[in-house]
Each structure stands twice: as C-alpha cells, then as structure tokens.
Image (cartoon, rainbow, N blue to C red):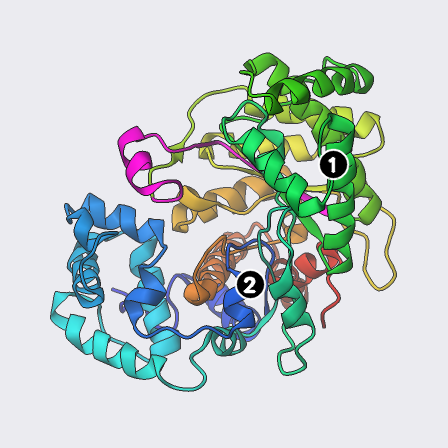
Amino acid sequence: MNKFMDDDFLLDSDVAQMLYHTYAANLPIIDYHCHIDAADIASDKRYKNITELWLGADHYKWRAMRSCGISERLITGDASDYDKFEAYCSAMPSLIGNPLYHWSHLELRRYFGFEGVLSPDTCEQVWNLTKGKLAEPDMSARGIMKMSNVKLICTTNDPTENLESHIAIREDPSFDIPVLPAFRPDKSLYVERAEFAPYIKKFSECAGVEIKDFATLCDVLEKRIEYFDVLGCRTADHGMDDTVLFDGSVSAAQADSVADIVFRRAVAGEKIDAETARIYRSALIRKLAKQYTKHGWVMQIHFGALRNVSPAMFRTLGADAGYDTIHGGSGRVASLAAMLGALEDEAILPKTIAYSLNPAENTAVAALIGCFQRTGDEMEGFPCMPKMQQGSAWWFNDHIDGMRAQLTTLAAQSALGKFVGMTTDSRSFLSYTRHEYFRRVLCSVIGGYVERGEYPLDVDALAQMVCDICYNNTKDFFEFRVV
C-alpha cells in the first residue's frame, strides 16, 4: 500500500518518478489562463485567514460543501470565517476521489508546511497554523507567486477595463513577474442577451465614442485590442458556453450586413432570435479573428458549459457560484469545425486552443485540430509550433482520470510532445499546486508508455518531452518573452 500523498504521489513507476523528480518538479510555471484579479497583485494583497484565501470565491469548494449537506449560511452566508472553515473541514472525510481533497492537502503542505490530514479533528490546528503563516511577510499575493516559481500569468479581462493594475505592475521595478491581460470579449458577442444593450452603453462611455452601429463596435474593439497588445497581451479567450454559435453558410459580407441590422435592433431593446444572433456572432468572430491573427495572438475557445441552471440560486447568488454544469447536447464540434474552416478560407485563422467541457468530445476535438494544423511563420527567438491545440482537462474534468483521458486521447490522435500543458483557470493564489498535480499525472502517463514497452527508455527524449509540455511549449506557442 502506498503512503498517503508521499513524495511519489501518483508516480506509479520508476520512470515516472525519475521524470518528475529530476525534470518536472522544479520547472517554472506559466499560467496562461486564470481569473486572478490583477488589482490583488498590484496591491500585494494579504489574507487574514485561510477562509479568505480558500473559500471566498471558490465555487469548487462551495459545490463540495453543498454535496455534503452543509447549510448555505456556512458556505456563502453570514457565518464567521472560522465556522466556514470548520464546515469545509467537516466535508473533507467524504471527498475521497475528489481533486479538492488532493489540492487542499498539496496547498497546506507546500505553503504552510502541514503534513497531516485535514479533518474535523485537525481543524483548529490548521486554522491557527495557517493564520500564523499568513501573517509572515512573504505570504502576500506577490510572495506566494514567487514562492510558486511563477514566471508569467495571463489574467482574464473585459475590453472595457482600463488595465490600470497591469500598468502599475509593469512599472513596478520591485516585482519581475509579468502579469499580462487576456482579451475576453464575450459580452459584445451575445447580442440576444438582456445585458447586451447596457453593456454597449458602458462600452461607449469607456471608449469615449458612441457605438451606434456594428462598424463602430468593430472599430472600438480593434482599438482595444491594440491597447491590450501594447500591454503585452498574447491571447484572447472566448467562453462559448453551451455551443460554438457560428454560421459558416453565410458569407462574410452577408454576415456583416445582417450584423449591423441586428446590432441596431439589440441596442434599441428589441428581442433578437437565435438564428440572427448566430449570424451576428459569426460576423464579429471574423472581425476579431482577423485582429488576433494580425497581432499573433492565440485564440482560446472554451465551450460545453451549461450556465446558471438553478434559477433560484442565480437570483440569490448570481453567476459563478457553483450552479453551472456540463452541456450534454451535440453539434458543437461540427460548429467549431465550420468556424475554423471559414476563418482558414479567409486567411484569418489565428493560433487556437479548443477546450470542451464535455469529456465525450475529447476524441472529436483531438481529431479536429489535426485538420487545421499549419506551421506559422517563425518569430525571432521562438521555434515553429503547430497552429492548433486541444486544451487541457478543464473544470469538471480537472481530476486524475480527466487529465489522463485528455492526455492519452491527445497522444493517440496528435502529438503529445507538442502539447501546451496545464493552466489553473483559478481565482486563488494557492492554485499553482495544480501544476504539480498535472505534472505528476503527466509523468505517470509518459512513464506508463515506457513501462509497457510502447516507447523506448530514451532519457534525453523523455526529459525533453516533459520539459516541453510543462513549460517550453507554452512559452513558444504564445511567444512569451520569458527565460
């Protein structure tokens, strides 16, 4: 029997242990997609206790606590911080097989030196230990990033944001970890939603221009892309939720014409039907993709989520509170293929990472990216990389089995050695341990191929592959200027 989460945790072969301990463990981290607030880094935020750091905005933990029958008052309500932490500890014994169990213990070990088991019995001990540690000088937002060997992160930012925190960080000589914005234009794409017209009004105020038609919207978005680019942005992220809403049957000119009519109707408060919304979105995606290609950005596409499925709790707590799920419908990959094909035909297909939240689509996505692989122009200082990537196991798939499934499917359908690896997709500064979790699973998967005689014990080749997947490929694919 293996010891609980010892040094060889998840490393189930001699090769896996060698690859992890010798090569993967100490590699730096590039977190190219996260939801950290740059203002917390600019201010070097400190946390008074573990509840603030762990439970303030973590809908993963909230869902787990609800699944254990814990009262909402102890999750998002007005209970004290200690009572909320105590409630989370009470859930821990029930979380066997849940990645939260592993993540929580990894975070306690790496940042607080706690080697025990988190449970109701150790609740007070861990509370006091973590509270004392968080009072130490290096346990601030910046200190945790440095401690984690982070080299660069990309936050997620709406086009209306002024990015003042990114500028402050950039101009601060005391902090040398680049914090780059990532462009998230979702609110300008969902023309059929009630929030669209108020958003366009806000966007107009931020831009200092009345956005009265589709052409003006595109001009303003282009200027915002240029602004983001000046501040180091290398990627745009699209949350396409339940499906990839793209109509490839309509030409670019036709889509532009429809989009202008739809835009004017939407800002006037008229209801927009699904079909015309799809055409509008197709037109705007074309405009955005052209700009991403111009600037050499990576387009990330997250799809397959079904959002806010509990109307009652959405009214109570709003979005991102743990009431999203996996969409089980079909047709998403075909729609994604239509979008990629149309962009390729018009020579505006940027480098792309496609993530599906539905694990049943793993093979389809891995196969699809092979249809659009082209080698782009080599940028000075960076080797050529394939144009298309399947995204890492995401959200509900961010566990041992989900990671293994994504890695082995990608290996079978594509070139695992060129994969861009892990990202936290997190709001927490302690989530960098998820890179360790991924690296352990990765070394186990690669070690398994060797142990079964499916790949030779070529240490140099294996070491290069591990280093590339964990760090180098990300740096090269996004063209990040880091060591």
Residue 126: where, in percent of width, then height?
Answer: 22, 75
Q: Is residue 351 visible?
A: yes
**Which element type, helix, strand or loop, lies under badge 2?**
helix
Could you tell me which quadrant the C terminus lies in?
A: bottom right
Q: Nearer the viewer, residue 290 or 375?
A: 290
| Residue assigned mark 1 | 288
Could you tell me which quadrant the N terminus lies in?
A: bottom left
Range shown magenta: 297-321
| Residue assigned mark 2 | 38
Q: Could you say which quadrant of the image residue 173 lies in?
A: bottom right
Residue 60: where, in percent of width, then height?
Answer: 34, 50
Q: Nearer the viewer, residue 458 or 39?
A: 39
**Which element type, helix, strand or loop, lies under badge 1?**
helix
Q: Could you say which quadrant of the image residue 191 lies in?
A: top right
Q: Vertically, is 322 above or below 447? A: above
Residue 5: where, in percent of width, then height?
Answer: 32, 67
